[in-house]
Amino acid sequence: MKLALSGLGAVAGAGAILKLAADAETLQLQMEVLTKDAGVAAKLVKDLNAFSATVPFNKMDLKQAATQLLAVQTPVSEIISDLAVLSNLAAGSGNAITDLTDIFAKFRSQGKVGMGDILQLQERGINIVPILTKKFGDLQQATENGVVSFHDIRAALYDITTGTGQFAGMTEKLSKDRKSTRLNSSHLGISYAVFC
């Protein structure tokens, strides 16, 4: 009985390894298609692997987020810095990085951002209204006039995740506390899974 159980465990482990290999190959192909350059894609995957070692998030979630950013025409040179911002936001707010990437990618693809869009962040504990109000004055009017752009939102998110911003250094702090674990975004950052 013991031998049968250990055999099942080995089969399950081998299946998991094959799935990880298939996921990695799929990611590489997605990156090649989205960047239209195998060399650029390979470098980005290498950079993502290095970045994932510095943050407390599941590697495949980070790669999914990077793929989504590429799909909305994010320049390759901005992928890692945008992921750093999104990682700090996720770590500080308790939201899944994939959820925040969905919102961020939507903002980029829309170009202009409305008040309802900004409230999506606020509902997740990410308040950039004071920063935007300082820039635009009447934020409601500015969004109605279509003058608040993705770049304004991106700049505000960078403000709160760098320097002395509210979420600055959150991933670094979490990484130090949880060197052997990674946040599992499928549980909205509440439960933890060992990172392999």
Image: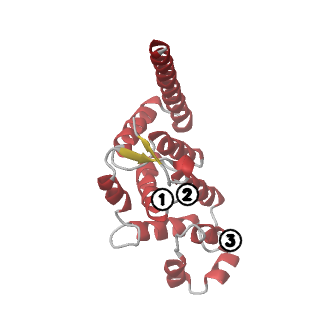
Q: Quadrant of residue 180?
A: top left
**Residue type at mark 1?**
Ala
Q: Which mark is residue 99?
A: none
Viewer-nearest of discs 3 and 1: 1
Q: Is residue 149 above or below residue 55?
A: below
Q: Is residue 72 visible?
A: yes
Q: In this view of the protein, which residue sits in the foreground, 57 or 119? A: 57
Q: CA gap, disc 1 to disc 2?
A: 7 Å
In what element is the residue under mark 2? helix
Q: At which x and y percent is residue 156?
A: 48, 71
Q: Position of residue 2 (x, y in %)?
A: 45, 16
Kind of residue indicated by mark 2? Leu
Q: Which residue is mark 3?
A: 116
What whole-number distance in Å separates the C-alpha atoms at marks 3 and 1? Answer: 20 Å
> Is 72 left or right of 49, judged from the image as shown?
right
Residue beneath label 1, please? 90
Mark 2 / mark 3, whichever is N-terminal? 2
Residue 129, percent across and down? Answer: 55, 78
For marks 1 and 2 on the same chain, the one whose residue lies earlier in the sequence: 1
